Amino acid sequence: APPDVCRCRHAVDVLIVVSLEPLGELLRIRSSEQQQEGPALALVLVLLWVTLRYSLALIRLLKEGGITLLTRVFGLLLAAISVQLIAQSVQGFVKG
């Protein structure tokens, strides 16, 4: 494959994993209330497989500009999640 396609495919793979992480966390929280993590994990894995399977079609659809845009949006989302987790940890530490 040409280098541009390889670079774009890697970017799409990263985008998919980052975008599915909040979904996995949401499913884990909901399933932990019912003590059923298996179905939630299976659903996330199936969604991950489907999106990775069709990543070349996503590359063709989004083109390089769309992938760059999504990379920045999901990077911002990941940064917001990490700031929230750190703030919650610090708050829990201070409360003791």
Image: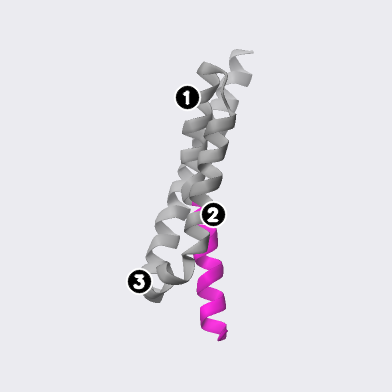
Q: Quadrant of the N terminus?
A: bottom right
Task: Characterize the local packing of mark 2: few (<14), some (14-19) or many (20 or more) Cα atoms within 10 angstroms.
Answer: few
Distance CA(mark 1)–CA(mark 2) = 22 Å
Q: Which residue is mark 2?
A: 49
Q: Amino acid at mark 2?
A: Trp
Residue receiving disc 1: 30
The question of residue 3 being in magenta is answered with yes
The stretch in magenta equals 1-18
Name the spot of residue 15 as percent of width and height, x first.
49, 58
Q: Is residue 73 left or right of residue 1?
A: left
Q: Main secondary structure of the magenta part?
A: helix
Identify the residue at the far top of this view.
96
Vertical relation: 23 (above or below) 70: above
Rendering coords of residue 79 (x, y %): 49, 47
- Mark 2 secondary-structure assignment: helix
Amino acid, disc 3: Leu
C-alpha span from label 3 to label 2: 18 Å
Q: Which mark is residue 61?
A: 3
Mark 1 Cα-neighbour bin, 10 Å: few <14, some 14–19, many ≥20:
some
Image location (x, y in percent) of residue 91: 55, 22
Which amino acid type is marked by label 1? Arg
Say which of 19 and 55 sits in front.
55
